[in-house]
Image: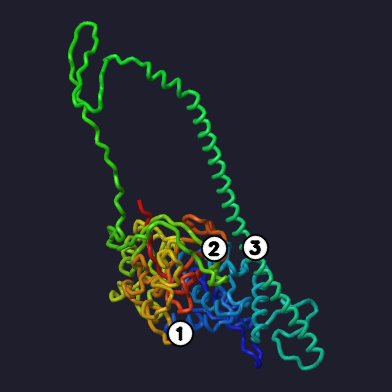
Amino acid sequence: MPSVDNRPLKVFLCHAHADRDPVRTLHARLTKDGVDAWLDKANLLPGQDWELEIRKAVREADVVIVCLSKQFNQAGFRQKEVRLALDTAMEKPDGEIFIIPARLEECDTLESLRKWHWVDLFEDDGYEMLMKALRARANKIGATLQTKKSWLPLGNTEPSVIKKPTHSFEKSEQEKLNKEISDTANRIKQEMKRQYRWENFLSNVKYRLSVIYIYRLSIFFFSIAIALLIFLVFYLQKNLPKLTQALDSTPNPNQISTDVFASTKTFTPILATTTKTLTLTITPTKIVTITPTPLPTEITTDKGVKMVLVPAGDFIMGSNDGSEFYGEKPAHTAYLDTFYIDKYEVSIAMYKECVGTGLCDPPMNPNSDTYYGYYGDSKYANYPVIDVSWKNAFAYCEWFGGRLPSEAEWEKSARGTDGRLYPWGNSFDTTKANIITTDYLHFYLQPVDTFSDGKSIYGVFNMFGNASEWVNDWYVANYYLYTPLRNPLGPSTGSDHVVRGGLTNEDKIFSRRESYGGRRIGFRCAKSTP
């Protein structure tokens, strides 16, 4: 039984429906060992709002155990609980044990959970390792749970429930036990930090090696081209007089006399049997100069979607006043080719057309933070679609006949070429964007064609405010230190993709980059020009 002086450790179990049997066994074992474990089948009562209760349970939990399996990892399954746990984890101090990925079988981990070290419950010592992590968390926050002697250091005679020491001998044993728990927690934290640093190091090494490989390959082909050009020059210099002499000495069998300024000439061919006089009429050729037709600044696709033109050229990307944590420094110049981008965010009505073909999945949650039945209600048809995974955004743009914009294309569409802070300039204005302010102005999502005064210089709406937007690039925090100078496409690998814009606080400017943007993530598409 838990100590009367402290509350038991609260644990939320997130799992797939197909894994209910092994998770029930885990729930029973944790409960027997003094953990206040929350499981939907055991804790939800008939008639309760299940989504509200799950949100409440995750918020109140001390630890969230994500039970991973092949069934759980299928696209979109239980993602709302994982995303809610990630939101809650962002509010915790660095180094806290809050999310524990627990594998029920051999399977991959979710991209969003790779920063946390997992435990394999199918191994012999898996449950003991899980309990050590829970003990460390309980000791950190002052909660209690029962223990087994096998979990304690050899020679420890502490009872199964940790109680306050009553005399010097018990105090010494308690301090010894607490030190063992603290050392275990520190080792887990150090292992997580080493793993994160190693993965980040490997990502940077792969990127730099790819850049060096491309650079050396381009030097190799450039050298071959120079050698061929030199050979051609020497060959022509040596053989051009012979070729000219051969052409000048070639006889004309028909004795044709030509004059480009005469309209009619007569010649007499020399034949063996007959002689005929032929008349050759020469018409001077008119030289026509072709002038390229300018691309239209706005087009409407065959699906009725409006797109605007962003012309080729340099622009300022990033900001020297930005955040080092998000990798927004330094400000640098990048060149982009011409492209088209959606004038508005993808609406619910347009996304439903892709869902109807079977190529796109419905949003992971039909409700928004402020609108119940958001996705299914026709009155929100012209509002931005949200809660869409990156894979579904990518699939929609392919069905649409385009692609997700690169991060550089998105930023140029929003900021123009002069590095301004907002689409309309450098002065913050609450009337030109759907953002959260101190008085919660524009807290609710708005239609995609609102706030016309806040559009960018190319005519793109809601690049600042309203829904956050996926782009095509992988997220690496220090990528701006190595960005290519022409048409940057982002790192070759990563653990998550970049999210830009969104219903944001007024202190965020356009250099802000994120790898996770909460629930309100939508997108827009782009197209390369012919």
Which image quadrant: the N terminus? bottom right
- Give the SS element for disc 2: helix
- From where the camera sits, is residue 78 visible? no
Q: Which residue is mark 1?
A: 45
- Give the SS element for disc 3: helix
Outermost residue toward the front in this view: 261
Q: Is residue 156 left or right of residue 394?
A: right
Q: Amino acid at mark 2?
A: Tyr
Q: Is residue 81 above or below residue 406?
A: below
Residue 217 x/y as whole percent: 56, 44
Q: Is there a contact, CB below 8 Å, between mark 1 and mark 3? A: no
On residue 198, which mark appears?
Answer: 3
Q: Earlier in the sequence, mark 1 or mark 2?
A: 1
Q: Is residue 189 above or below residue 526?
A: below
Q: For the residue carrying disc 1, how many other residues have a C-alpha within 10 Å: few (<14), some (14-19), or many (20+)?
A: few
Q: Amino acid at mark 1?
A: Leu
Q: For the residue carrying disc 3, how many other residues have a C-alpha within 10 Å: few (<14), some (14-19), or many (20+)?
A: few
Q: Is there a contact, CB below 8 Å, between mark 3 and mark 2? A: no
Quarter where residue 391 is shown = bottom left
Q: Earlier in the sequence, mark 3 or mark 2?
A: 3
Tell me which residue sits at (60%, 79%) in the image: 93
| Foreground pick, 220 / 140 | 220
**Could you give the CA–CA distance between mark 3 and mark 2, rounded to whole angstroms?**
20 Å
